[in-house]
Amino acid sequence: MSKTVKLRKGLDIKLIGVANKSKDSVEQSSVFAVKPTDFHGVTPKMVVKVGDKVKAGDVIFFNKYQEDVKFLSPVSGEIKDVVRGAKRKILEVLISADSSIDYKDFGVKAAESMSAEDVKAHVLAAGLWPLIKMRPCDVVAKPTDTPKAIFVSAFDSSPLAIDYDYALHGEEQSFQAGLEVLKQLTTGKVHLTMNGTVSPDVVFTGAKGVELNKISGKHPAGNVGTQIHHIDPINKGEVVWTVNAQDVVLMGRVFTTGKFDMAKVIAVTGSEVKNPKYIKTIIGTSVKNILANQIEGDNNRIISGNVLTGDKITEDGYLGYYHSQITVIPEGNEPMFVATKGWLGLGLNKFSVNRTYFSWLTPNKERTLDTNLNGEIRSFVMTGEMEKVFPFDIFPMHLIKSVMYNDLDEMESLGIYEVAPEDFALCEFVCTSKVDIQDVIRKGLDEVYNECL
Amino acid sequence: MIRKFEPQHDSKWSKLHPAWDAFYTFLFTPGETTQKGSHIRDGIDLKRTMFTVIVALIPCLLFGMYNTGHWHYASLGEAGEFMDNFGAKFGYGLLRTLPIVVVSYGVGLGVEFIFAIRNGHAVQEGYLVSGMLIPLIVPVDVPLWMVSVAVIFAVVIGKEVFGGTGMNIVNVALTTRAFLFIGYPTMMSGDKVWVGGLGEEGAKTADGFSGATALGDLATAASVHEENVTALEKITSLESKIISMPELTGQLTSKIAALKDIIASNTAVIESKLAMIPSLWDSVFGNVMGSIGETSVLAIGIGAFILLYTGIGSWRIMLSFVAGGFVMGLLFNLWDGNPFMGTDPLQQLALGGFAFGAVFMITDPVTGCQTNTGKFIYGFLAGFFAILVRVFNTAFPEGVMMSILFFNVMAPLIDHYVIQANVSRRMKRLKTKNS
């Protein structure tokens, strides 16, 4: 049964710098990276050494504890460097790319005419497995699990997010092929959830053989976690897999072309980008070419992903594996004097859920927000603020506290299986006490993963 | 410039860093940036939150000052109309109230700083509001040393032993008042303390002036009413004796007559007390006697509007607290056992500290319920019991404080059951799935 869900809770943060609807091409970057840190919980076991030649589709590393989950090179070229951090943890594997990409051939396949085992084996072999994430815990799925359903969100509601209706227009064939793959991976249903407030592109409305749901409301309506919770919530012992809409296209493309072609459309956004727009690029690209001559000022935060959940990267950093967006906002590392910009000021430029600053006079204005914490870390004092932006039948503050004092039973009964850090992004945003809530939830999920799964 | 004085980690002043930090962050929101998770954050912080509450308290403070002056002059018989002599009245109130505010902040923040330095954590902003609430809920004639003793007790025992701001179980400001009430009952009740200057030796009052609050009057009326009830019972038993033992008629008749005299004089007292109860409009406007900031429902209403409109105060708690009090008032009305019970429910809500408690005390997010459903239950029960305590315990007409303190303690229990309901919903979903 398809469902239509209406959310009353949530928050849309209106920022300056929405990408214009124009697809630009940028000169291909000379360096690409596969970052093991993008895959939480994966311990990389390297297959290649510095100096090795690779094709697009050759294995770079695999998961030490799940050897059939392989991570492939998105481009052909030479392994340039393996960047390590503390305790020799591998942070980035850098590949200097050839000017024209040489693809390894995986063979053209049609998932609908294959057996379920063959599809799974091919997804693993063709390096598509990391695109599938599992709930609970929001990590790369385990091939041994049988998910009760697979969820795909057809839109992203986070601030300045990529518009899939625009970005994936014309990809009907690959998208449908990707859905066919997903259908073979579960005995249950594949849910595709569309935005109920707009009319989605034909790429989604024309999808066949899947449950088409609609959800309307403010962010986090587009988060797949919200959709799971309202359509088919996860109980203890159940597993649900999730795939990003664009990654479904990538999967389909690998099946239909036989090439590990990880080209995707990303949105370059944010108040400090001169000309926010869409561009076509490849997973793992360096952002240097993309942002060259595009940034205003020199005191900026560059984020791979959106402002709520993305990763902080440098100006010559690399696009994250799951990200379809680069955001540039100003750093807020200047102290603010109390009476002008601090806590006694009028605060016309501050954005707040409450009406304590006079910015409530202009609620629909698009704003430039910086990375300042806007306060100091404190004990939890205010209550009820998270509930306003958290559309789950879960008590956010109590779940957070149960993680803080590490009570597994309580985490379980309060619903930790249903949530991912990104679901708490808005809670973190509104928190008066400036607690790093996503980090707390991630710790709780790690604990659950180690003890219970 | 201020950075120059920052105690370095290795210097001998390093222990004073929390104190420096408190001053620095008071003046500047630090250039601290987000490192992980959400890169942008809401503009609000705890300082702004607390500041908003203080803004909401200002109408109460200003009205309280003026009202203090008014009743001082009224006790001398020189008040005239409420608005006469505006400057003198306000000046007197300012002179009486300001020292209490200064002592409350000075002592309370002093204790906070000591604990912050000792424990090496930042000075949290919780006391900014408590420090303003305390002057508003004490009688104007309270000696300053009592205020400081009570503040030290409340901050140390009520808050710091539990871990400081955000961890306390009972409301700090109310703990102060409870300490004063239990430790120095003569200074917190009766008919001398509510008017500035009345408690001093040799103070003169104009003829016919009484310094008792409306709640005190009602409590007196209620206890006198009790005496009447027992007297009436005695009369009935005496009359039955007359029938059984006619030989004692003369003696008993004189006893009955004496009792009837008592009843008559008591009834006169009740009538005079009830006559002194201010009209509903007066108690809403606030030109009545009481603690400094709690008398004017109008001033409190302005504060309530600020808290609700900015989203700082919880409308759920405020609404249900008032509803709880109103329902209890109605129930007592139906019973009508004594003059106190017979008071109009709206009047009950307007008298004493009920309105102040509803807006500023019960809504304390730290000590109240944290779940939305819990907030409704918590507010309703606290309001219900506030009127119950007020009416039943005539020795202690200010039941609001006791009721709120009691439900501060009960709040985690209410939350527990609300959360269990959510947990069992989740369990049920799992069971239906498996069956």
Image: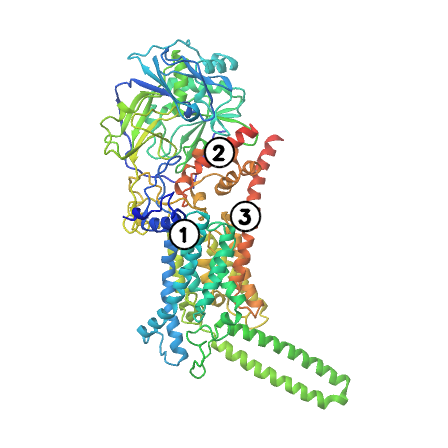
Q: Please, what is the three-letter code of the amino acid marked with disc 3?
A: Asp
Colour mode of the rendering: rainbow
* Element under disc 2: helix
Give the label on residue B125, or none: 1
Q: Is residue A421 above or below residue A284?
A: below
> Looking at the image, do the residues carrying marks 3 and 1 touch, with CB atoms under 8 Å apart?
no
Chain letter, disc 3 residue: B
Q: Please, what is the three-letter code of the amino acid marked with disc 1?
A: Glu
Is B116 placed left or right of A30 in the picture?
right
Where is residue B87, by image quadrant?
bottom left
Chain letter, disc 1 residue: B
- Name the residue at the left extreme: A293
Q: Please, what is the three-letter code of the amino acid marked with disc 2?
A: Lys
Q: Position of residue B50 (x, y in %)?
A: 39, 53
Give the label on residue B11, or none: none
Give the label on residue B415, or none: 3
Q: Earlier in the sequence, mark 3 or mark 1?
A: 1
* Element under disc 3: helix
Q: Position of residue A204 (x, y in %)?
A: 39, 25
Label 1: few (<14), some or many (≥20) within 10 Å? many
Q: Are marks 3 and 1 on the same chain?
A: yes
Where is residue A260, by image quadrant?
top left
* Element under disc 1: loop
Q: Nearer the viewer, residue B136 or A170?
A: B136
Label 2: few (<14), some or many (≥20) within 10 Å? some
Chain letter, disc 2 residue: A
Q: Is residue B289 above or below residue A43?
A: below
Q: Which residue lies at the image location 37% right of the left edge and 14% below the top edge? A: A50
> Looking at the image, do the residues carrying marks 1 and 2 touch, with CB atoms under 8 Å apart?
no
